[in-house]
Image (cartoon, rainbow, N blue to C red):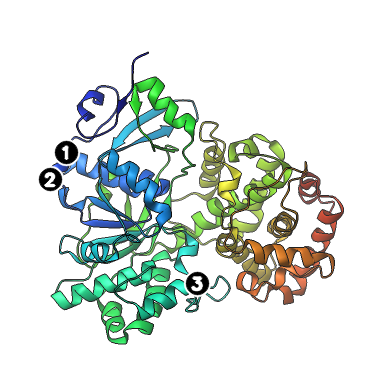
C-alpha cells in the first residue's frame, strides 16, 4: 500500500493536479489580519474568502496570523505549524459531489497563553490592519438578558489589574491598541465573524466597557478611532471526523491531520466601515452594504434558530444529525411552519432576498446528507444562543399578538433536556454549556414550580411574568413531563390538538 504524503509547503506541488492549491507565493504574504479563534468555521469562511482573493488578485498584504488564547488551542496550533499552516477544505454537495481545496491564507499561528507579550506586539505591528474574531457568543462576556458586559468575570478582573499579562480577548485587544496609539499608528479594525446580531456593535460595546474599567483615556481613543463593522456570516461547517481525514488519505494519498468539511453554500454580508483599509473580498463574492441588520436578523432568526429547533427537539427524539431531522417529514414540516408562522411575520423585508426561496434553500442545506452536522454540536452553549436566536422572536410575537406555540415547545423541551439529560430512549445527551449546572438546577425545580426554568433572568429576562407566554409554556411543560415523546407534542401543535 502506497504511503500517504504529508501536507506541507514542500509537498504542495505533488497535489496540484489532484486538487486546487494556492497559486500565490506564500513566502511573500504578510499577515495583515490577526484572527482570534481558529476553528472550523473561520477556516471554511473568512480564510477561504481570503485564499480565493489571493489566488485571483495581488492581495499578499492580507494573509492571516491565527491566535489562540487558551491552552485548548494548542492542538490546532501544533498541527497547523507542522503543515506550514496549510489545510484541506472538503466541500460536500447534496448530490455526493466533493470538491477539495488546499487553503494557504493562514501563514502563522501564535498562542496567547504561552507568550501574551508576543501576541500583543504582533497585533500592534504596523502590518496588522484587522483583528477578526470567532470566539462564539459566550466569548463576548455579556449578560444574555440585559446585554451588559460582565465585569465580575475572573479573567476580566485579572486583565483590568494586569494589563501587560492578559488572559481574555478584551485584555489583548486593549493592550495592542494602547501600543499602537503610543507609536502613532492607526487603529486596526475589530471585525467580528460570530453569529450575534449586530456583532460589530456588540464587540464595540463590550470592549469599550472593559477599556473604561482599565484605562478611561485609552477607551476614549478606541471609541473615536476603532471601527467595528457588523457582518452576517453563513456556511454550515460540522466538526471534522476521522472519516474526513481517512477520505483524504484513501482518495488523494494526502495526510492532513485537521482538514475542514463544509457545505457549498457561503455568504458574507459586511458593513463597509474599516479603520485602516480592508481586502477586496467583494471580488470573490462577499457583499458590502450600508446596513447589515435585515440580513443578519433574517439569518439568525431563520437559520440559527432553525438549527436550535431541530437540535433540541431532535436530540430528545433520538435523532443524531440535522440531515436526519430533515429526512423525518414531521421535523421538516415543524421547522417550516415555525419559519412561516412565527419568524416570517416579524422580519423586515431584505433587499434582494425572496424569503420563501431563502427558507426553501435552508431546508435543502439542512438536509444535505453528506454534511452530517451533529445535533450535540448544534446544541453547544444554547444558553448564549437561544436568547438571540429564538427568545427574541417569542418576545416580538407576544408584542404583536402573533403565534408563539412552535418556539415555546422548544423552550419547554430545553427545560426537560436540561433536567433529565437523556433522550426519550434513555440515552444520555452530550450537553456542553457554560451554564449547564444553573440550567440543570432550575430545570429540576420544575416539579415544584412549573416556571422555575424561566426564572433564570440572565436568559429569559422578565418572560416569566408574561401571562400569555407562561400559560402556553406551563401547558407544554406539564405535557412533556407526563409524556416525553416529543414527536407527539410536535404533532399536536401541527394539527391543532394542543
Q: Which residue appears farthest toward the top when viewing the image?
A: 1
Q: Are marks 1 and 3 in contact (CB under 8 Å)?
A: no
Q: CA distance from mark 1 to mark 2?
A: 9 Å
Viewer-proximal residue among 349 and 398: 398
User: Mark 1 highlights which residue?
Assistant: 24
| Residue 115 occupies quadrant | bottom left
Q: CA distance from mark 3 to mark 2?
A: 40 Å
Q: Looking at the image, tell me whether mark 1 or mark 3 is earlier in sequence order.
A: 1
| Residue 277 occupies quadrant | bottom left
Viewer-proximal residue among 299 and 420: 420
User: Mark 3 highlights which residue?
Assistant: 142
Q: Looking at the image, tell me whether mark 3 or mark 2 is earlier in sequence order.
A: 2
Residue 395, placed above or below residue 254: below
User: Mark 2 highlights which residue?
Assistant: 28
- Quadrant containing the C terminus in the rendered view: bottom right
Q: Are marks 1 and 2 in contact (CB under 8 Å)?
A: yes
Secondary structure, mark 2, is: helix
Query: What residue appears at the point 27 percent right and 66 percent down from the top-left corner?
Result: 189
Query: What residue appears at the point 38 percent right and 75 percent down from the top-left corner?
Result: 159
Amino acid at each position: 500500500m502506497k504511503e500517504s504524503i504529508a501536507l506541507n509547503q514542500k509537498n504542495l506541488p505533488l497535489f496540484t493536479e489532484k486538487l486546487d492549491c494556492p497559486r500565490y507565493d506564500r513566502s511573500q504574504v504578510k499577515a495583515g489580519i490577526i484572527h482570534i479563534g481558529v476553528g472550523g468555521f473561520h477556516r471554511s469562511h473568512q480564510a477561504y474568502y481570503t485564499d480565493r482573493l489571493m489566488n485571483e488578485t495581488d492581495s499578499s498584504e492580507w494573509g492571516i496570523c491565527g491566535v489562540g488564547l487558551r491552552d485548548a488551542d494548542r492542538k490546532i496550533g501544533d498541527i497547523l505549524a507542522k503543515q506550514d499552516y496549510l489545510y484541506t477544505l472538503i466541500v460536500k454537495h447534496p448530490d455526493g459531489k466533493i470538491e477539495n481545496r488546499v487553503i494557504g491564507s493562514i501563514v502563522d499561528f501564535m498562542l496567547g497563553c504561552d507568550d501574551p507579550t508576543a501576541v500583543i506586539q504582533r497585533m500592534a505591528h504596523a502590518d496588522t490592519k484587522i483583528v477578526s474574531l470567532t470566539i462564539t457568543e459566550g466569548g463576548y462576556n455579556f449578560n444574555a438578558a440585559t446585554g451588559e458586559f460582565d465585569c465580575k468575570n475572573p479573567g476580566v478582573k485579572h486583565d483590568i489589574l494586569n494589563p501587560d499579562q492578559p488572559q481574555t480577548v478584551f485584555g489583548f485587544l486593549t493592550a495592542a491598541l494602547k501600543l499602537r496609539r503610543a507609536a502613532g499608528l492607526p487603529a486596526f479594525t475589530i471585525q467580528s465573524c460570530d453569529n450575534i446580531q449586530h456583532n460589530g456593535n456588540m464587540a464595540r460595546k463590550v470592549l469599550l466597557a472593559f477599556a473604561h474599567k482599565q484605562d478611561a483615556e485609552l477607551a476614549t481613543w478606541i471609541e473615536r478611532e476603532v471601527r467595528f463593522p457588523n457582518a452576517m456570516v453563513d456556511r454550515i461547517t460540522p466538526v471534522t471526523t476521522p472519516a474526513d481525514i481517512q477520505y483524504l488519505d484513501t482518495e488523494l494519498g494526502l495526510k492532513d491531520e485537521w482538514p475542514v468539511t463544509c457545505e457549498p453554500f457561503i455568504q458574507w454580508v459586511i458593513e463597509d466601515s474599516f479603520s485602516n483599509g480592508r481586502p477586496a473580498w467583494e471580488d470573490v463574492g462577499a457583499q458590502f452594504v450600508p446596513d447589515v441588520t435585515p440580513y443578519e436578523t433574517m439569518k439568525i432568526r431563520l437559520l440559527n434558530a432553525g438549527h436550535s429547533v431541530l437540535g433540541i427537539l431532535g436530540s430528545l427524539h433520538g435523532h443524531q444529525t440535522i440531515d436526519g431531522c430533515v429526512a423525518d417529514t414531521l421535523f421538516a414540516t415543524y421547522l417550516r411552519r415555525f419559519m412561516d408562522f412565527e419568524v416570517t411575520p416579524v422580519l423586515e423585508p431584505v433587499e434582494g432576498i425572496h424569503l420563501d426561496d431563502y427558507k426553501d434553500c435552508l431546508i435543502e442545506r439542512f438536509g444535505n446528507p453528506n454534511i452530517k452536522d451533529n445535533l450535540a454540536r448544534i446544541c453547544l452553549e444554547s444558553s448564549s444562543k437561544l436568547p438571540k436566536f429564538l427568545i427574541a422572536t417569542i418576545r416580538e410575537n407576544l408584542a404583536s399578538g402573533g403565534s408563539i406555540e412552535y418556539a415555546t415547545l422548544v423552550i419547554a423541551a430545553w427545560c426537560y433536556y436540561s433536567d433529565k439529560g437523556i433522550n426519550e430512549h434513555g440515552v444520555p445527551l452530550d450537553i456542553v454549556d457554560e451554564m449547564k449546572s444553573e440550567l440543570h438546577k432550575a430545570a429540576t425545580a420544575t416539579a415544584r414550580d412549573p416556571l422555575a426554568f424561566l426564572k433564570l433572568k440572565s436568559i429569559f429576562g422578565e418572560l416569566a411574568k408574561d401571562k400569555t407566554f407562561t400559560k402556553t409554556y406551563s401547558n407544554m411543560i406539564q405535557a412533556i413531563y407526563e409524556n416525553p415523546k416529543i414527536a407527539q407534542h410536535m404533532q399536536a401543535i401541527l394539527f391543532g390538538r394542543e
